[in-house]
């Protein structure tokens, strides 16, 4: 039986080799096949991303022919070509965590807002949402970005995290999320659109009052449709339940 494999379309150039990000071997618990898309430089605007469509379609078809089960990309802005890329192959394509927003909205109380975490918030709007099959009229969202933070700009430029930068990234992201949740108290879930944020998101999840979905959690869902791993069930003890009730 063929094992479920994730295919990752990688931008052309240096990418951060950090746990939680697409290039790192520790990020996924299942086999991954990465393919650099020749000539695909980091997009900074919707127009940049849309111009990469022919390159991504060709690369997606190559990955399909190599036998991967699900296809993704290591840049959230590629959501803008989600529908065209999905139409070009016969396997699931998940170019952005934004595709999961309608499902997430159904999981939380009606009327509650979804907070979208990104890098440059000016690059995220109705075009991105429409490309993923929904609008903010259907599912109210509020967008917040880390692009104004020196730490995250440094990470974007260098693609490296050292012992000095990591806590700065974490604290700046914590501040952005805190401001968002205080400004929009009706938020019921967060969705990280940016594929760089999972570098430190795991450090913050335990302290947040709402669930945080990102490209990794959405990909886990998609890949598990082909092969779901099973393990021994763990019973939540009284201590764990007590702690959860006060979180």
Image: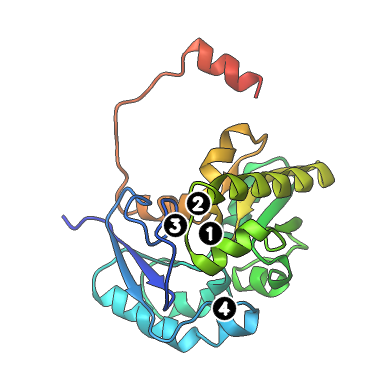
User: Which x, y percent locates residue 39?
Assistant: 43, 86
SS for dot 4: loop
- Residue 242 lies, with reference to residue 177, above or below; the image says above
Judge left or right: residue 61 versus residue 186: left
| Residue of label 3 | 21
User: Which x, y percent locates residue 54?
Assistant: 45, 88
Marks 3,1: beta carbons within 8 A: yes
| Residue of label 2 | 199
| Residue of label 1 | 196
| Sequence-first tag of 1 and 4 | 4
| Residue of label 4 | 43
Q: Marks 3 and 1, how far apart in space? A: 6 Å
| Sequence-first tag of 4 and 2 | 4
Q: Which of 175 and 194 is in front in this view?
A: 175
User: Which x, y percent locates residue 243?
Assistant: 59, 18
SS for dot 1: loop
Query: Residue at the location (34% across, 80% down)?
Result: 61
User: Which x, y percent locates residue 209?
Assistant: 67, 34
- Residue 215 lies, with reference to residue 170, above or below; the image says below
Q: Marks 1 and 2, how far apart in space? A: 6 Å
SS for dot 3: loop
Q: In which quarter of the image is residue 137?
A: bottom right
SS for dot 2: helix
Q: How crowded is mark 4: few (under 14 residues within 10 Å), some or many (20 or more)?
A: some
Marks 3,2: beta carbons within 8 A: yes
Query: Residue at the location (16% across, 55% down)?
Result: 1
Is there any visible trace of residue 54 in the rendered image?
A: yes
């Amino acid at each position: 039986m063929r094992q479920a494999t994730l295919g990752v379309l990688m931008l052309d150039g240096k990418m951060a080799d950090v746990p939680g990000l697409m290039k790192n071997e520790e990020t996924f618990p299942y086999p991954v096949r990465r393919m650099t898309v020749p000539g695909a430089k980091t997009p900074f605007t919707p127009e940049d991303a849309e111009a990469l469509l022919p390159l991504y379609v060709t690369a997606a078809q190559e990955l399909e022919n190599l036998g991967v089960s699900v296809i993704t990309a290591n840049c959230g802005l590629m959501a803008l070509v989600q529908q065209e890329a999905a139409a070009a192959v016969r396997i699931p394509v998940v170019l952005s965590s934004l595709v999961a927003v309608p499902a997430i909205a159904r999981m939380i109380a009606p009327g509650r807002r979804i907070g979208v975490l990104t890098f440059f918030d000016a690059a995220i709007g109705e075009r991105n949402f429409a490309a993923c099959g929904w609008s903010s009229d259907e599912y109210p969202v509020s967008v917040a970005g880390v692009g104004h933070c020196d730490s995250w700009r440094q990470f974007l430029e260098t693609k490296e995290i050292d012992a000095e930068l990591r806590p700065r990234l974490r604290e700046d992201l914590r501040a952005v999320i805190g401001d968002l949740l205080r400004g929009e108290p009706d938020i019921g879930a967060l969705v990280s659109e940016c594929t760089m944020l999972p570098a430190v998101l795991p450090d913050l999840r335990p302290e947040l009052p709402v669930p945080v979905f990102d490209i990794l959690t959405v990909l886990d869902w998609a890949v598990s449709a082909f092969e779901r791993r099973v393990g021994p069930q763990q019973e939540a003890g009284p201590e764990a339940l007590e702690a959860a009730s006060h979180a």
